[in-house]
Amino acid sequence: MSPTKGYAAHSAQEPLKPFSFERREPTATDVQIEILFCGVCHSDLHIARNEWGGTTYPCVPGHEIAGRVVKVGRDVKKFKEGDLAAVGCLVDSDRTCGNCQAGLEQFCEGGPTFTYNSPDQHTGGMTYGGYSKSVVVDQDFVLRLSDKLDLASSAPLLCAGITTYSPLRKWKVGKGQKVGVIGLGGLGHMALKFANAFGAEVTLFTTSPGKTADAKRLGAHEVIITKDQEALENQANRFDFIIDTVSAQHNINAYLGVLKRDGVLCLVGVPPDPMPVAAFNLIVPRRQLAGSLIGGIAETQEMLDFCADRGIACDIELIKIEQINDAYERMLKSDVKYRFVIDMASF
Ligand code: NAP
Ligand code: ZN
């Protein structure tokens, strides 16, 4: 075991604070990474504050990890000391079930091991995430990063990137389609970039009129301010696909209404409480309500390679770890432009 330090939540009510703990020595197939940057996902806040239930304390959040390899086990072939490397939301799975075999480790039937707040097979405790200086992960769950992209701006691709890329690919979003993105935060800004890169006609639905110019720069062709009921009603039956990234309670019926026949509303945002759905909004005209969870390891690598090829990265605001509690408060006010990334090297 080797000592490291990070920031942890010790209860749902307290701010995060410095925390010392140990990482395992790399096994034969492990990669040890010095964490240089870690993105701040709204899921970190939901889990640190136990908004979904099931948080074990202390909890070290962080699943948008970018850094440099400092040590590899003797059987590691994919990485060597000094390489850039990244870790997203997953650090292990059973690798044998049907979903793992299909490259969908996030749905592992044996239960995926998430990067934090998951039972840790090695230590018997819980996994600790990227708000820390160092992490040890099996090589099969470590991603390659191109040096063509800025490292700090690449970190949020590991969750915000793959979570929006994966459903846009699965539902074959592209040229000739009208696509909506609800919410312009970390996930939303990547959804705009990807939907635009895939050739769709892209509309942002936002509660924040001040984000209009940014949305257009990020890839939206049109921006609809959702506080204006009439503006939404004018869009009835126009959209092929909508990705909903909103983190809090909202009226999904209003968005179902803008879908065409057979259109899909895909939830990726996870408001803690259930949201009512009016049956008629689905059955006429045969609309679909769906969901999607991050993406598998192979698809995450595909997304990172696509981003490197196309020069796509995240728009970030770099913070020090000491600012994490303020960053959470700003996130709750929809004041994120458009992802906080912690500079771990300065800690
Ligand atoms: P974020 O940066 O805080 O962005 C969320 C955006 O939602 C806000 O910027 C705001 O956009 C909008 N919003 C917030 N409160 C709202 C409200 N009450 N009504 C309407 N719109 C509201 O969060 P994020 O990191 O992108 O994460 C978004 C959600 O996705 C979270 O619930 C997170 O846990 C979840 N998530 C899911 C997955 C998955 O695999 N499915 C992966 C990562 C994250 P506007 O200002 O434009 O309205
Ligand atoms: Zn996340």
Image: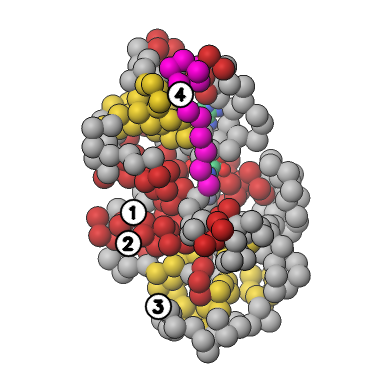
Q: Quick check: is the Cβ at mark 1 less than 8 Å away from ligand 1?
A: no
Query: Distance from label 4 to label 3 (Cα)?
Result: 46 Å
Residue 65, compared with residue 247, is above or below; it is below
Residue type at mark 2 is: Asp
Relative image position of residue 55 (x, y in whole percent): 73, 51
Mark 4 or 3, nearer chain start:
3
**Dot 4: what SS?**
loop
* Nearer to me, 114 or 62: 114
Query: Distance from label 2 to label 3 (Cα)?
Result: 16 Å
Residue 110, compared with residue 68, is above or below; it is above
Residue type at mark 1 is: Ala
Picture residue at 35% right of the left edge, 28% below the top: 240
- Residue tagged 2: 305
What is the crowding at mark 2: few (fewer than 14 residues within 10 Å), some, or many (at least 20)?
Answer: some
Picture residue at 56% right of the left edge, 79% below the top: 30
User: Would residue 282 be counted in the magenta stretch?
Assistant: yes
Relative image position of residue 59 (x, y in whole percent): 69, 57
User: Would residue 95 be counted in the magenta stretch?
Assistant: no
The circle on residue 287 is 4
What is the crowding at mark 3: few (fewer than 14 residues within 10 Å), some, or many (at least 20)?
Answer: some
Query: Distance from label 4 to label 1 (Cα)?
Result: 32 Å
The N terminus: image quadrant? bottom right
Mark 4 or 2, nearer chain start:
4
Query: Distance from label 4 to label 2 (Cα)?
Result: 33 Å
- Residue tagged 3: 83
For the record, the magenta segment spans 281-293
**Side of 314 relative to 121 (left or right):** left
C-beta proximity under 8 Å, tags 2 and 3: no
Picture residue at 40% right of the left edge, 78% below the top: 83
Q: Quick check: is the Cβ at mark 3 less than 8 Å away from ligand 2?
A: no
Query: Distance from label 3 to label 1 (Cα)?
Result: 19 Å
